Image (spheres, rainbow, N blue to C red):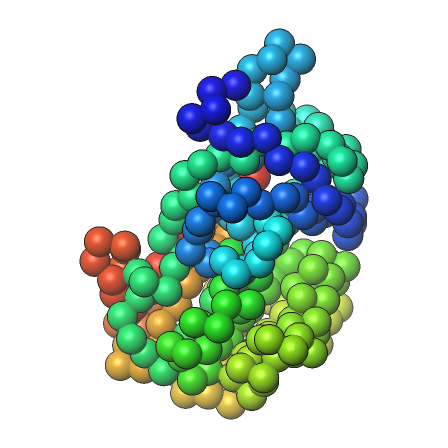
Amino acid sequence: MNPKLATIEKVLSVHHYTDRLFKFRITRPQSFRFRSGEFVMIGLLQDDGKPLLRAYSVASPSWDEELEFFSIKVPDGPLTSRLQKIQPGDEILLGKKPTGTLVLDALTPGKRLYMFSTGTGFAPFASLIRDPETYEKFDEVIVTHTCRQVNELAYSVEMVEGLINDPLIGEMAQGKLRHYTTCTREDHPHTGRITTLVENGQLFDDLGVPKLDPATDRAMICGSMEMIRDTAELMEKAGLTEGSNAKPAEYVIEKAFAG
Ligand code: A2P
């Protein structure tokens, strides 16, 4: 393992939500700096001693002393088939170069920030909604999470509930952070794809907010390639333009990683 590329960290805790989803926390070296919303390579050493690394959004905020990740389990996935078996005390590889576009710096100033996510695409937003800077920059923060089944929403539901009661972030998030969950294949208070709910206006009616407006609204999108493509199209239709680290604008995208 090339020590220039990755450090060896320890698994601190693992929590399984469903047979498809789990979260884990690992040690964070003091030298590891990242911006909330970024991703990094993590992985395991293979039997032949070579590293197997995949991109993962850091789900913990940049001030946290530990690092948290939210992962899918793919039965025949080269990494996740092994990663889902990790236990506290196990070793895990952590890349040294976090990067990404789902960062506050890639957005121009606005009033209302939307974070649209499906499945494990919630991970970068788990980081951002725990970062005080998000609430310093925006008056209202709306994070949406869509999954096939109700039990797949557990991570985001637990996170938002815990956050409101957090002594550090709770006060900043209170009255600003709104969590909107939808299911596509099970009964739930809100059902349907987020793209449908944006397109037919149901999301805005349910939240009691005006339709998307490039003068006030900013958006971050994280999900499958198809979900990103379709949601980005709706942002463009509403007049928002895509931003990047080099050229901040009104919305940014990143694929939810799996493997
Ligand atoms: P659906 O059940 O209608 O496919 P997945 O687990 O396949 O990544 O899906 C996670 C969630 O994202 C599901 O609720 C799924 O809805 C939804 N989804 C899948 N494709 C799109 C898309 N192109 N636009 C919006 N939502 C999508």
Residue 175 horizontal/vertical position (percent): 56, 88
- Give the residue displayed 68% in from the left and 30% down from the top: 91
Query: Residue 73 lies in what quarter of the image?
Result: top right
- Give the residue displayed 62% in from the left and 26% down from the top: 44
- Give the residue displayed 28% in from the left and 55% down from the top: 244
Q: Is 79 placed left or right of 94 in the picture?
A: right
Q: Is residue 210 visible?
A: yes
Query: How many marks can you see?
Result: 0
Question: From what the image shows, is residue 210 above or below residue 116?
Answer: below
Residue 106 horizontal/vertical position (percent): 30, 61
Residue 121 horizontal/vertical position (percent): 54, 53
Question: From what the image shows, is residue 186 above or below residue 65?
Answer: below
Q: Locate the C terminus and report the quarter of the image it occupies.
A: top right
Q: Is residue 112 visible?
A: no
Q: Is 85 placed left or right of 236 in the picture?
A: right
Q: Nearer the viewer, residue 152 or 40?
A: 40
Question: From what the image shows, is residue 96 above or below residue 239?
Answer: above
Residue 246 horizontal/vertical position (percent): 22, 53
Q: Residue furthest left?
A: 247
Q: Nearer the viewer, residue 34 or 204?
A: 34
Q: Residue furthest top?
A: 48
Q: Nearer the viewer, residue 36 or 84?
A: 36
- Give the residue displayed 48% in from the left and 24% down from the top: 3
